Amino acid sequence: MTAKISVNNLPTKDRQHCCNCNLNSLCMAVSLDTREMSKLDEIIARGKPLSKGHQLTVQGDPFKCVFAIKTGSVKTVTTSCNGDAQITGFYFPGDLIGLNAIDSGICQDTVSALETTTVCQIQFEQLDDLSAQMPKLRRQILKTMSKDLCNEQHMLQLLANKNADQRIATFLLRLSNRFKARGFSESRFRLSMSRNEIGNYLGITVETVSRVLTRLQKNGYIKVENKEIDLINFKALLQLSQESE
């Protein structure tokens, strides 16, 4: 069952608005002035925290809403006609998800919370109408869609051209960059996803994920403590990943 999120779930005094949200430089509100933020704020529903495993959308459902992650993290999963489930992305605070359903009008994947998560929910028809009135908002939505396309291309390159060690190194460095952009530590962070989920996303087995992490730690590239990751040698990881700086 998909999430039913209502602004009425939170008392008015406890609801945070776009103008004072510390993620507005990452989300759709970037470049908007105070008046425009107020208009955007009027169509956003903010609900109670969602527990781990809660499904925001289910693949095949009619497309109605997009979601902006406020706290926590989610994963997107696409299931093939023969039942094979493939994780297609991990998303963090400031990320906007659901735009890939615009063309078909059908949700293209199942979106599930990886941990306790809060989201901003926006009815797409309202967002579409508002963006027609606000060119800066429309441009930001297009930039978000462009970024998603680039990420998909990078993922295809990752799976096609890199071995397991390179995939893990690339994955950790990209997470580092994403956390840094959100004002968090780029060298120490917690993995909200399991090793099995990492393996599914990267196209390798969970055993391979564990072996590579152990090898990277032994070589002094990283330090692993349960789900806590310390990136110790960025230069070595960059060379291993074959990514550009």
Image (spheres, rainbow, N blue to C red):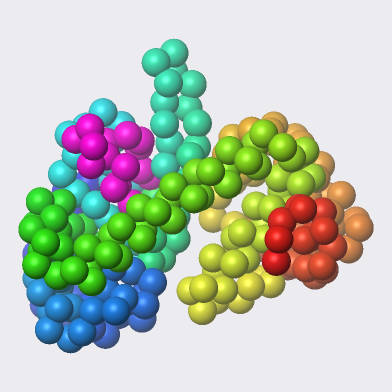
Q: Is residue 109 magenta?
A: yes
User: Which residue is nearer to you in this view: 15 or 236?
Assistant: 236
Q: Is residue 116 visible?
A: no
Q: Is residue 45 left or right of residue 175?
A: left
Q: Is residue 54 left or right of residue 159?
A: left
Q: Is residue 85 visible?
A: yes
Q: Is residue 153 magenta?
A: no
Q: Percent from the top left, x then y, of residue 59? A: 30, 32
Q: Is residue 97 above or below residue 231?
A: above
Counting every numbered tag in the picture gives: 0
Residue at the farthest top position: 82
Q: Is residue 5 above or below residue 111?
A: below
Q: Percent from the top left, x then y, of residue 114? A: 45, 50
Q: Percent from the top left, x then y, of residue 90? A: 48, 50
- For the C terminus, the quadrant is bottom right
User: Which residue is nearer to you in this view: 47 or 36?
Assistant: 36
Q: Residue at x 27, y 64 (%)?
A: 139
- For the N terminus, the quadrant is top left
Q: Percent from the top left, x then y, of residue 237? A: 79, 60
| Part of the protein shown in magenta | 97-112
